[in-house]
Image (spheres, helix red, strand yellow):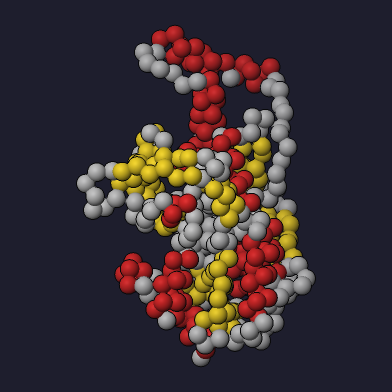
């Protein structure tokens, strides 16, 4: 059991240079070191065009009055015009008290779109921003970071001679990523070494390990779903087909540290387990609502096949949609810890320069009408996971799930 648990713990680490990682202003979630829970994309909008009215121009004149004073009087270097515009947008958003309504510059927006696609070009490393320092949490097996000798615990100080301390994760990741075949130089600080060292890595195309699965002892099918990118539903179906062919006595769907992703992916994933009925209710500020129903053809909807969903405090957004649908339908039980509580819906608007404005437009509720946002889901069976458990290679949540299915 120890080897299996260690393997599963490695799989469950969530934030990667590949994931939809961002700074405190917007994150859609994400396991280790996560600041928020993932923004869930419900549509891609064409660039919007708008012309301010004469009244709007007049009210905005105070901004230009202040800006021109800075141009004339400020003793120091001013930001570029583009930087000023982006900062102004972010300043407005900061007044909303909604970390999920956010602005991404063109480079950050491109990273977010790559993450949703399920692949990207970079080095293949799991990272976390801790106390202003970018720490490598894990290197992905067989990828450039591993081949270059990077290790868990390494701190990235510079990217191509640019210091990255106190950057947001997105800012740092945007420097590390780049076209495949191109080099990136990293300055690394490693515990036990007196001086930092440099390593040059050739970027490659990285396919995200969206799903990990295997049969556990006791004929239990185990599936770890890392996120809800566009690849998630098809990879989950593939895993289910292979595992169900081995006639398991139960299924464990591990959504721990899963930050969420696409709403459409959440509906497809939930439909593999919930045969019919609503999956989630989407309510808008005018009181109208939309109900998303389970899609037909699910592979594991047979109620005679027991199902456990593993969740924790970093299971967010689309993860909570799936877990809530299964719990409300009585299709399976939730084991672990209370989920994150990210039940707001962000609609992305692509602006004319490629930047992106993500606006909260609705809230999600489970089929039985339970609020997800800032509430989270309570497990049917609460099992804590401590730092001591992780360090010792123990997984009491998984152990409880196996015990439940084999009793």
Residue at (43% x, 55% y) in the render: 146
* Residue farthest to the right, as pictured: 296
Where residue 254 sits: x, y (%)? 53, 70
Quadrant of res 357: top right
| Number of marks in picture | 0
156 to 268, vertically: above or below: above
Residue at (45% x, 40% y) in the render: 184
Residue at (73% x, 57% y) in the render: 290
* Residue farthest to the left, as pictured: 194
210 to 113, vertically: above or below: below
Where residue 231 sits: x, y (%)? 65, 59
* Residue farthest to the top, as pictured: 72
Where residue 351 sits: x, y (%)? 66, 33
Instruction: Please state, as top left, top right, bottom left or bottom right, where the N terminus lies in the image.
Output: bottom left
135 to 399, vertically: above or below: above
Q: Is residue 98 left or right of residue 242?
A: left
Q: Is residue 249 visible?
A: yes
Residue at (53% x, 20% y) in the render: 81
Q: Is residue 344 visible?
A: no
Q: Is residue 290 left or right of residue 128?
A: right
């Amino acid at each position: 059991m120890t080897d299996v648990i260690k393997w599963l713990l490695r799989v469950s680490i969530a934030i990667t240079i590949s994931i939809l990682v961002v700074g405190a202003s917007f994150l859609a979630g994400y396991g280790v070191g996560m600041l928020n829970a993932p923004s869930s994309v419900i549509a891609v909008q064409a660039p919007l065009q708008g012309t301010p009215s004469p009244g709007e121009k007049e009210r905005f004149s105070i901004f230009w009055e202040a800006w021109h004073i800075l141009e004339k009087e400020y003793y120091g270097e001013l930001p570029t015009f583009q930087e000023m515009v982006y900062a102004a947008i972010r300043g407005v958003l900061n007044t909303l008290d909604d970390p999920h309504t956010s602005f991404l510059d063109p480079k950050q927006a491109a990273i977010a779109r790559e993450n949703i696609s399920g692949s990207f070009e970079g080095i293949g490393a799991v990272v976390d921003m801790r106390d202003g320092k970018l720490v490598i949490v894990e290197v992905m097996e067989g990828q450039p970071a591993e081949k270059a000798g990077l290790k868990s615990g390494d701190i990235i100080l510079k990217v191509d001679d640019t210091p990255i301390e106190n950057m947001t994760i997105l800012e740092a990741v945007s420097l590390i990523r780049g076209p495949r075949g191109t080099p990136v130089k990293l300055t690394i600080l490693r515990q036990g070494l007196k001086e930092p060292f440099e390593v040059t890595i050739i970027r490659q195309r990285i396919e995200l390990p969206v799903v990990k699965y295997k049969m556990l002892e006791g004929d239990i099918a185990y599936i770890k779903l890392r996120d809800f990118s566009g690849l998630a539903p098809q990879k989950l179906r593939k895993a289910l087909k292979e595992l169900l062919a081995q006639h398991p006595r139960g299924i464990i769907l591990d959504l721990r540290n899963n930050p969420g992703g696409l709403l459409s992916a959440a509906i497809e994933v939930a439909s593999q387990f919930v045969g019919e009925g609503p999956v989630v209710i989407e309510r808008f500020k005018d009181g109208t609502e939309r109900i998303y129903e389970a899609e037909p053809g699910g592979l594991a909807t047979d109620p005679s096949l027991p199902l456990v969903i593993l969740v924790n405090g970093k299971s967010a957004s689309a993860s909570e949609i799936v877990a809530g649908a299964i719990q409300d339908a009585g299709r399976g039980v939730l084991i672990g810890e209370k989920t994150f509580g990210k039940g707001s819906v962000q609609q992305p608007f692509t602006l004319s320069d490629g930047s992106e404005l993500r606006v909260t437009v609705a809230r999600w509720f489970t089929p039985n009408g339970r609020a997800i946002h800032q509430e989270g889901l309570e497990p049917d069976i609460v099992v804590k996971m401590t730092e001591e458990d992780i360090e010792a290679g123990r997984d009491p949540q998984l152990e409880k799930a196996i015990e439940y299915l084999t009793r």
